[in-house]
Amino acid sequence: MLERPFSSSYADGVLTLGGSIDEYAVAALRTAVQEHSAGGTRALAVELSDVDFLPSVAVGVLATGLRQADQNGVDFALVAAPGTIAHRVLFITGMPYHEAVPQPWSAGPAATESV
């Protein structure tokens, strides 16, 4: 199986990730999450449905983002469509996630609901 290179794009509070988040891409993931969430002080949804490989070190980066957002009272949503690798990883690890970007996505208080 060929791994697709890591990709990320950001628009309207949603960071969309794709490809393999391998050991080389984790630094880029960490930087993107910190930059687009302003260090956990701005709402961010991380769309993971197109991710092919999500190792524990990447899950750790996402957990840190969740913790920082929670400490600052802002929303941080992990999004993974059913049947995707990210969906399985988030389910198995017990991380809170949504199956679609919550609508309307806002910068309101931290969400407590997860799927």
Image (cartoon, rainbow, N blue to C red):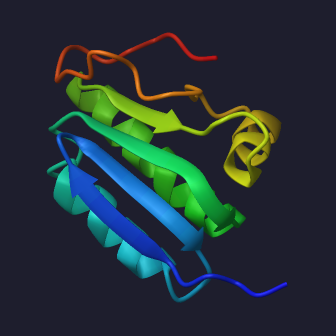
**Left or right, 64 with reference to 87:** left
Q: Which image quadrant is residue 42 in?
A: top left
Residue 56 against residue 69 in the figure, above or below: below
Residue 53 against residue 86 in the figure, above or below: below
Q: Position of residue 16 (x, y in %)?
A: 39, 54
Q: Which image quadrant is residue 43 in?
A: top left
**Left or right, 65 with reference to 75:** right
Depth check: give the residue in front, 109 or 6: 6
Q: Position of residue 13 (x, y in %)?
A: 21, 40
Depth check: give the residue in front, 98 or 81: 81
Residue 85 against residue 21 in the figure, above or below: above
Residue placed at 57% from the left, 29% from the top? 97
Q: Which image quadrant is residue 20 in?
A: bottom right
Depth check: give the residue in front, 29 or 52: 52
Residue placed at 49% from the left, 37% from the top? 78
Which part of the image, by quadrant, shows the N terminus?
A: bottom right
Residue 89 against residue 81 in the figure, above or below: below
Q: How many marks?
A: 0
Q: Position of residue 41 (x, y in %)?
A: 16, 38
Which part of the image, by quadrant, shows the C terminus?
A: top right
Q: Position of residue 2 (x, y in %)?
A: 76, 87
Residue placed at 58% from the left, 57% from the top? 50
**Left or right, 6 with reference to 16:** right
Residue placed at 82% from the left, 39% from the top? 92
